[in-house]
Image (cartoon, helix red, strand yellow):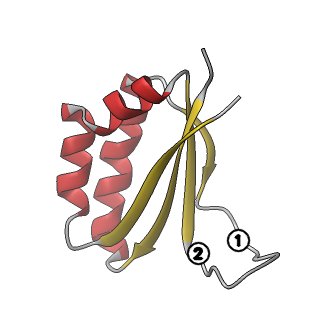
Amino acid sequence: MSSAYIIANVVVTNPTQYEDYKKWSTEAMKAHGAEVCVRGGKVEVLEGDWSPERIVILKFPSVEAAKKFSASPEYSKARAAREGAAIMRMIVVEGL
């Protein structure tokens, strides 16, 4: 079984409200055994015209586990807290 990564590019539009999202998303990550690889570190573009703002990378044991996290009641609570506070672009990628 190969691992999987959720990769998100987040544009935070309301930093104060976004703190609630971070709190609830952290709880969801813990509940689903996500390994946090990157969470909002400094970004430097090396090639191309991509201008990401806040990058988050989470590792899961499988694509199914990542999808289960994304669809979970715990993460739904975080998603609701994020409404109006950020623009989220999120993908899941199969890893090695």
The label nearer to you, 1 versus 2, is 2
Residue in the foreground of this view, choosing between 12 and 90: 90
Image location (x, y in percent) of residue 46? 82, 75
Q: Residue at x 19, y 44 (%)?
A: 77
Q: In this view, does 90 lie to the left or right of 43?
A: left
Task: Relative to 58, say whether 42 is above or below.
Answer: below
Q: How many marks?
A: 2
At 17% across and 54% down in the image, what residue appears?
A: 80
Residue 39 position, x and y percent, is 58, 53
Give the Cα distance between marks 1 and 2.
Answer: 7 Å
Q: How crowded is mark 1: few (under 14 residues within 10 Å), some or many (20 or more)?
A: few
Which residue is disc 1 drawn over?
A: 43
Residue at 43% of width from left, 75% of height from top? 11
Q: In this view, does 17 lie to the left or right of 94?
A: left
Which of the two labelled residues, at mark 1 and mark 2, occupies the earlier sequence position?
1
Q: In which quarter of the image is the C terminus?
A: top right
Q: Name the residue under label 2.
A: 52
Task: Check disc 1 and report its element: helix, strand or loop.
Answer: loop
